[in-house]
Structure formats: C-alpha cells, structure tokens
Amino acid sequence: MNAINGTVLTYGQTGAGKTHSMEGPSIQTNDPKLKGILPRVTQIIFDLIERADEAAEFLIKLSMVEIYMEKIRDLLDTKKDNLQVKENKLHGIFVAGVTEKYVQSEKEMLQILQTGLANRAVGQTLMNCESSRSHCVFLLTIQQSDIEDRSIKTGKIYLVDLAGSEKVEKTGAEGKLLCEAKTINKSLSALGNVINALTSDKPCHVPYRDSKLTRILQDSLGGNSRTALLCCCSPSTLHASETLSTLRFGTRAKLIKNKPRVNSERGRHELESLLQKSYQECDQLRAQLLMSSARLRSLNQGMPFDAEANLKDSIDPVKLSDKLINKFPTRLPQTTGDVFELHKEIFVESLLEESFDKTQFSDLTDYKCDEEHYAQEQLRQHLDEEKLFLSAQDDTAKTIRVLQESLEKLMDEKSKLEKLNKGLEMELLACMRLLHDPTKAVGMKWPTITSSVHGRIHANPRSAVQCQFKLLNMIDTASICCLWRSSLTKVRNIIGQTRRA
C-alpha cells in the first residue's frame, strides 16, 4: 500500500504445512483464527482501501502461476502452459503473457483465488494425500493514483507457496511422481545456491537464471522488495534432519540484504515545481552569461562596465530605435517602466545574438585551423615521400655505375680471350698442315711448336689444360702416321718380291 514491493515465501519439507499456512483449511473460510496468509492479505488490502483518502484511486490486479516441471503455467488460463520470464527497464522482472484479473472486492478476489487453486497440480504420496507438485506464485499489483496531483504509486506483493523438499525413501514416489520430486528438489537447490551466493563474504555470481523460480523471485532475493520467509517444520522426531535443514536454510536466508524503494511517478504539482525551479536556474545562468558577455565587450572597448547605467541611459522613449517598434508592434510601451523592460529585452537579445555570432566565428576559426593543420600534415607527408624517392634514385645511380664498370672490365677480358683464341687457331691450322709429313713435323717443327705453345701457356695459364690436350693429340697423330708409313713400306716390299718370284 506504500508502493513498496513485498514477498512472503513458505519453505519446508513436504507435509510440513506450507500450503495450509498460505491458504488455511479453505480459501473461503470465515473463521478469522483459521484464515491463511492469502485471505488475510486480501482482507487487509481492502480494509486499507476503505480507510484511504478520498482523493486516492486504487487499481488491483491479480495473477496466479505455478512452476511445474520447470514450466510456468497460468492458473487463470490453463491454455498458457509455457510462459516466459522477461525483464525490461519499465516493468523489471515479469512473466510475459500472464493473465491479469482486475479485482474490485474481497469476495471477488477470493473467488478468483479459489478458481486458480483448483487448477494447481497435486499428487498423493506416503507423507501427504494432497502433496503440491509445483511452486505456486500469487502476484498482487496495487496501483494508487492521486486525483489532485496525478501522482501514481505502484506496489507488488508476491505470495509464494513452495513445493516441499522430498526424500524418495519416505515419500515412496515412483514414475511421474519421482520425476516431479527430482524437478522440485533441483529448483529448491537452485534457490539455496542463490541464497548462498547472496550471503557469501566474497563477491560472486548469483545464479538467478538456473531456475524459473529464482528468476521470478530475483527482486525478492537481494533486490527491490521486502521479503519474509516462513519456515514450516514437522514436530515429529522422525523428520529431525529435515527440520534442521529447514532451519539452517532460514538462518542463511536471514542474512540477505534487500534494497526496497518506493515505486512512484511524480505528480503534476511536483513536476510543475521542478519545472519552475529549472526555469529559475536557466534565468540565473542566462543573466550570468549576458553580464559576462557585456563585461567582455566593455573590456575589449577599453571602457568600464556598468549594466544598470547602460540600461537607464536608454529608458527615454524618444531614444527608442525603430527596431523596438518593429519587433513589438502589439506591445508598444505606455510607461517608462514598459520602455525599460522592452529595451532590456532587446539588449538581452542583442547580447545573445552577439554571443551566438562569436560562437559561430569561433567554430569557423577552429574549422579553418583544422583544415590548415591537415594541409600541413599532407605537405609534410609529400615532402617525406619525395625525400625517400630521391634517396632511392641516388642508390640506383650508384648501382648503375658499378655495373657499368664491371661490364667494361668484362669486355676487356673478352677481347683478350678472343685474340688468344685466334692465335691458337692459327697455330692449330699450321699443325694440321704439317701432319701430312709426320717425320718432318715431329723432327723439324716440334721444337718450334713446343716452344710456341709453352710461351702461350705462360702468357695465359687458363688455357694450359687445353694446350696440353692439343699437344698430346698431335703427338699421338704423328706416331700413328709413322707406323702406317712403315707398315705400308713393308707391304710394298713384300708385293715387289712376290712379283719378281
């Protein structure tokens, strides 16, 4: 009712009385001592509305969902069996597409609650003949608006009936009931992990998204809400371990620190007050700006500045310019005070125009400076590129000169080798002519040839191997020729003797 979100959760083992605490023996019970949390909250809300100020209008919306097998089901519209949890800046955490019933009386709300509870999933176990197989979340949204200033306050209250933690050996769950028990224990474990993370001494990630239950209760656990946890325990000693676990869970949850705040929208009067205050601040700042501009202009002209004197000197209506008449044709001054006010407005506007022109000139100057700076940078880059090009050109010229010198040396060496080859060819031809007379060639010309060849070898050592091969060939050829001639002579002698005989 005070536009602060609230949450009430019931936690404990199966059969410990969570649903009974939330609903009572029946949602429609009239016994005030046996009423559960839901009917009590309903009664309190409408009692407060009746006692509220007449200028306040209230709008109440009711939603009911259950989280069954990690799916969000709408209890007021059973066709919606897989709703999604979403978040935005306007609504915070909410269930998209959930059915919202507008309620006008306590009786109507109890009827809607009874209809929704009839659609809830229940099952029979060894510990409870009607065991809740899902987490049930009741959401009441109360919107309060003021008729006079149109301010709006919104508060939400979550009433959560958690499914009980189960041990299979005690409940005897099998088949579908076993799968439901696993899902329930898993979601309760995720709730415990969130509480452990929120109460940890070290900052760590809070796993709200591990379960649909923790995602819906994100604001209730460490967020914008006041949260109460009702731990339901069994008095039987057979369930001492579960009771101890429940109490430890409550001890940890008690350490969570939420940050509740008032969810309100500003009304008309408050907005008008803020607007008026902002106008005053703007006027003060504008006056300071005008005074500073006028003072600066006076300093630039080398004259003392006196704003009041400057204004009072121009109060005479005779001294008003045509600009005053043209600008305010429907507000011609009637008194000296009117003249002063109108002239003051013109003076202020002229200062504003001058300030605007100075700003534009400053912006233009900055733009020109930027352009000049950019042009200088481009010129500097071009000069650097030209220097690199000239340096590369000098290196290329040096390389060309070195190559030309090497080419000249190679040409000289080539000419020398050509001359040497011509001489060797001539000597070789002479040797070939002398081969027709091997004896003469070897006996008479051999010393001359040998001395000539040795001289060539000393003159050009690189052709020594070639000359040696040539000499060996010449010697072999001369020897073979001598053998042929001697053999031919013997054959001729034998033929002659044969003819004589």
Image (cartoon, helix red, strand yellow):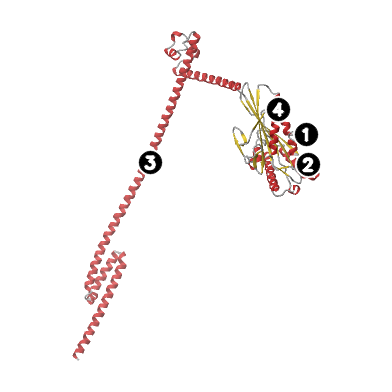
Circle 1 or circle 3, nearest the eye: 1
Residue 251 occupies quadrant: top right
For label 2, count other residues whose C-alpha is less than 10 Å away and answer few (under 14), some (14-19) or many (20+): some
State yes or no: discs 4 and 3 in contact (Cβ < 8 Å): no
Label 4 CA crowd tier, 10 Å (few <14, some 14–19, many 20+): some
Q: CA distance from mark 1 to mark 3?
A: 95 Å
Q: Which mark is residue 34?
A: 1
Q: Earlier in the sequence, mark 4 or mark 3?
A: 4
Q: Are marks 2 and 4 in contact (CB under 8 Å)?
A: no
Q: Earlier in the sequence, mark 2 or mark 1?
A: 1
- Local secondary structure at mark 1: loop
How many marks on residues?
Answer: 4
Q: Secondary structure at mark 4?
A: helix
Q: Amino acid at mark 2?
A: Ser
Q: CA distance from mark 4 to mark 3?
A: 86 Å
Q: Label 1 amino acid?
A: Leu
Q: Which residue is mark 2?
A: 234
Q: Which mark is residue 378?
A: none
Q: Amino acid at mark 3?
A: Glu
Q: Nearer the viewer, residue 2 or 447?
A: 2
Identify the residue under disc 3: 385
Q: Sequence order check: which comes first, mark 3 or mark 2?
A: 2
| Disc 1: CA contacts within 10 A as few (<14), some (14-19) or many (>=20) | some
> Which of the marked residues, 1 or 3, is nearer the chain's N terminus?
1
Mark-to-mark CA distance, 2 and 4: 34 Å
| Residue 7 visible to the viewer | no
Q: Which residue is mark 4?
A: 46
Badge 2 element? loop
